[in-house]
């Protein structure tokens, strides 16, 4: 299998398509959401999206891991424990699979979303066994090792 190594570029002026929020999730207003697929990983476990939304209040239920970076506007996020946080341009947040949050968009928010499908428990176990075996035979790898493109001191 050949892996596509072409670098993909996008402009901030891209056209986003309709991405309606489930009607049952909407709590107030008529938020209108749009998105655009930007890129995906070769193993189909990760994708990157641009997403925006107009004013409104709604619940969001995460069935996969999502890391976001707010690009424009702001949103108030309330978690299931009642903790709230306003996110503005430059802020990031991580929503693990299985979590939920209430989003309140006062005017407009635009984010880039990095979605990752968590590995099944059986695959995680096999990965741990594989790394344990490599350590046993002297081929040490460290979980969380910094990629070569991010050198440390």
Image (cartoon, rainbow, N blue to C red):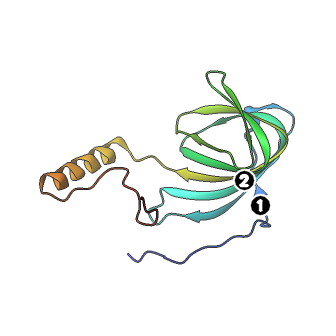
Q: Horizontal and vertical percent for residue 60? A: 67, 36
Number of labelled discs?
2
Q: Secondary structure at mark 2?
A: strand
* Picture layout, residue 63 above or below residue 19: above
Residue at x 65% of width, y 62% of height: 37
Q: Horizontal and vertical percent for residue 99? A: 56, 33
Q: Horizontal and vertical percent for residue 105? A: 81, 38
In primary-sequence order, the first of circles 2 and 1 is 1
Quadrant of the rendering where the N terminus is positioned: bottom left
Name the residue furthest top. Answer: 81
Residue at x 77% of width, y 67% of height: 14
* Tag 2 near tag 1, CB within 8 Å: yes
Q: Secondary structure at mark 1?
A: loop
Q: Horizontal and vertical percent for residue 120? A: 38, 44
Residue at x 53% of width, y 34% of height: 98
* Picture layout, residue 90 above or below residue 79: below
The residue at which mark 2 appears reads as 51
Disc on res. 16: 1
Image check: 43 left or right of 80? left
Name the residue furthest front. Answer: 153
């Amino acid at each position: 299998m050949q892996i596509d190594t072409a670098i993909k570029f996008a402009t901030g002026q891209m056209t986003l398509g309709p991405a309606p929020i489930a009607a049952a999730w909407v709590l107030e207003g008529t938020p209108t959401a749009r998105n655009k697929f930007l890129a995906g990983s070769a193993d189909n476990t990760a994708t990157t999206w641009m997403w925006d939304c107009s004013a409104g209040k709604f619940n969001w239920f995460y069935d996969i891991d999502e890391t976001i970076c707010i690009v424009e506007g702001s949103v108030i996020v309330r978690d299931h424990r009642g903790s709230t946080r306003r996110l503005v341009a430059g802020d990031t947040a991580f929503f693990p699979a299985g979590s939920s949050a209430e989003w309140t968009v006062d005017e407009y928010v635009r984010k880039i979303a990095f979605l990752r499908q968590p590995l099944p428990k059986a695959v995680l176990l096999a990965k741990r066994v594989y790394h344990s075996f490599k350590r046993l035979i002297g081929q040490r790898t460290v979980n969380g090792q910094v990629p070569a493109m991010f050198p440390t001191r």
